[in-house]
Amino acid sequence: MAFVDVVVMAAGKGTRMKSSIPKVLHHLGGRALLQHVIDTAMQIKARRVVVITGHGAEQVEATLQGQAHLQCVRQMPQLGTGHAMQQAVPVLDDDGITLVLSGDVPLIQAYTLQALLTLCDGQHLALLTLQTPQPHGYGRLVRQGSAVQAIVEDKDATPEQRQIQEIYSGIMAVPTRLLRAWLARLDNHNAQQEYYLTDVVKLAVADGCHVLAHCIDQAWQVEGVNTPVQLAQLERAYQQLQAQTFMLAGVRLGDPARFDVRGSLSCGADVQIDVNCVFEGVVRLGDGVRIGANCVIANAVIEAGAIIHPFTHIDGETLGVTVGQDARIGPFARLRPGAHLSEEVHIGNFVEVKNSSMAKGSKANHLAYLGDATIGERVNYGAGSITANYDGANKHRTVIEADVHVGSNSVLVAPVTLGAGGTIAGGSTITKDTVPGALTVARGKQTSIANWQRPVKTKT
């Protein structure tokens, strides 16, 4: 098969989105609409991707910087889809097939594009069409028998043509050498006074080139985004596809309608995910992991057998979070960037861990904060205890060696090291290193004042 060069239409304003963000940069499933299209182009091994920008060009082009085999061309002013393609063909080579995609049609599938390219075969004009009972607003496919004769835009269609239920999706595959010649012959003699890319169909017919159509009935593949309502509808369609894929691979979902992947999620065997869970960034779940309801997990690795109880928030950002084998996290726990927990660690309700490591079997079961800390094996970290790691200008580290017990409501003022096997009495404020194996008490002496009267409010 000939080389494939993908051209993505991304110059539109997107007025109906009512947003200062260019339409193609709105997110679906955690990625820009345009990025979905580019990623699919990469799946079919496109030689290059050319993105046509226009409205918000600077913003769009900035998001694409650094992506291999990709370049942008600008359409200024916007005079129609045919005019857009006229800006792109100068950077295309005649030995390839041009595959035209839309930057606001994010769910087109690689297998569908591959079928269209096979139909084109480097010789024909191949159109992707949709059979739909609701064709209003779309270009109609006009056939003579099975042969495609033209695409008539909705505004230019006759009443009879508006009854046609096969519509053009905006996606085509065409030999570049032929496309170049047809684009040079376009005119704007139509209701919109625009240069329609769809007019290449009648030019192809006039030149004796076969015009073929690959018709599908999965509307979600070719639905575009023009309004926030349509974006939300496609988000649900995308998440439903994700849910089906994971369930077919063996993942048990509490309710596939309440499951969101906004990044990359990989799952081992026998993973269970309850309702209303959101996965962002890159997340990996090991064998037998169980995720409770209403969890948000981003940029994390959760090893085999770990249980994440409901309402837990894990976000590794750039540093990542790791949860070791057979660990227990939550409910209502928060793991922040740089939290690295070994096997059998327990983190309970309302415990926050940030930029800290916890060795095997350590526990912080409730109402605690661990920041910038290194914690050894089998440490028990009491309720209400915190590491005071910030002095107002710099962060400092706390080291808790193996088998230390930290009593409830203690404050560990970093930098400080708690010696192995030691015990910190509840309510202590620790400002110096402690001796291994010792009981350390650092709190004011308890005093009781007999017959003390509470203050009373003064009447005014």
Image (spheres, helix red, strand yellow):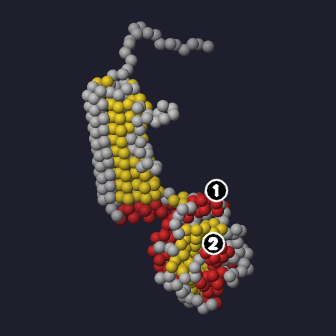
Residue under numbered circle 2: 137
Disc 1 to disc 2, how far (Cα)? 23 Å
Give percent across and percent down for residue 38. Answer: 52, 67
Give percent across and percent down for residue 140. Answer: 61, 79
Whether residue 139 sits left or right of residue 418 in the image: it is: right
Crowd class of label 1 (few under 14; some 14 to 19; many from 20; radius 10 Å): few
Please say if 291 is above or below 2.
Answer: above
Residue drawn at point x = 33 percent, y = 41 percent: 358
Task: Please indicate, yes or no, whether residue 420 appears anywhere in the rendered image.
Answer: yes
Whether residue 290 sits left or right of residue 58 in the image: it is: left
Residue drawn at point x = 55 percent, y = 68 percent: 70
- Camera-nearest residue between 275 and 54: 54
- Camera-nearest residue between 438 and 225: 438
Residue under numbered circle 1: 19
Say how many tags the image has: 2
Residue 89 position by quadrant: bottom right
Of tags 1 and 2, which is closer to the observer? 1
- What amino acid type should be assigned to the residue bearing mark 2? Gly
Q: Of helix, strand and loop, which one carries label 2?
A: loop
Please say if 376 is above or below 241.
Answer: above
Residue 329 position by quadrant: top left
Task: Please indicate, yes or no, whether residue 232 appears anywhere in the rendered image.
Answer: no
Q: Dividing the image into 4 quarters, which one contains the C terminus?
A: top right
Crowd class of label 2 (few under 14; some 14 to 19; many from 20; radius 10 Å): few
- Camera-nearest residue between 180 and 271: 180
Give percent across and percent down for residue 18. Answer: 65, 57
- What amino acid type should be assigned to the residue bearing mark 1? Ser
Residue drawn at point x = 37 percent, y = 45 percent: 340
- Tell which residue pokes out farthest to the bottom in this image: 208
